[in-house]
Amino acid sequence: MYTVCVRDHLMIAHSFRGEVFGPAQKLHGATYVVDVELSRKDLDPDGIVVDIGRASDELKAVIASLNFRNLDDDPRFAGRNSTTEVVARTIFDAMAAAIASGALGANAHGLSRMRVVLHESHVAWAAYEGALP
């Protein structure tokens, strides 16, 4: 399996509901380093997994809708906590839609898996990984 990773970052604010979150129930900020790993069994006709420039541009576009926002006010998270895991899935879904729409190029339809990792710090991160259609 071949894999390419693109990276960016975003800054958000949010709060959580539930005793398990302790002081994080209050409004607080987070800066995430975001990795999107794209995988395929065989390289495309150009000898690559995916165009890294297009993948980087699309990641930047996807996180722009989250960056410098209070996720408590974002309808995508209405009725649920915007945990790191949930935000990773949100980015995954948006990137998968971009791939399906052709935003990463025609050969990107050969991608088979994607993993989105949100690094909260140098010692903690969460991810969502799944197959691509």
Image: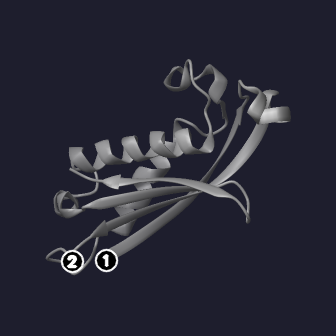
Which colour scheme appears in the figure? Answer: one colour
- Is the Cβ of the residue at disc 2 closer than 8 Å to that at disc 1? yes
In this rendering, the answer to whether 1 lies above or below 93 is: below
Q: Is residue 50 visible?
A: no
57 horizontally vs 48: left or right:
right
User: Which SS class for mark 1?
Assistant: strand
Q: Which residue is mark 1?
A: 2
Residue at left offset 67%, top offset 37%: 68
| Image spot of residue 122 (x, y percent) | 73, 65
Closer to the N terminus: mark 2 or mark 1? Answer: 1
Q: Is residue 107 left or right of residue 4?
A: left
From this view, report whether residue 132 is shown above or below residue 4.
above
Q: Local crowd at mark 2 within 10 Å, few (<14), some, or many (≥20)?
A: some
Q: Residue at x 38, y 68 (%)?
A: 52
Mark 2 belongs to which amino acid?
Leu
Residue at the disc numbered 2: 43
Q: Label 2: state its secondary structure.
A: loop
Q: Position of residue 42 (x, y in %)?
A: 19, 77
Numbered tag placed on residue 105 in the rendering: none
| Residue 118 image position (x, y, % from top left) | 59, 54
Between circles 2 and 1, the one closer to the viewer is: 1
Disc 1 marks which amino acid?
Answer: Tyr
Quarter of the view holding residue 78: top right
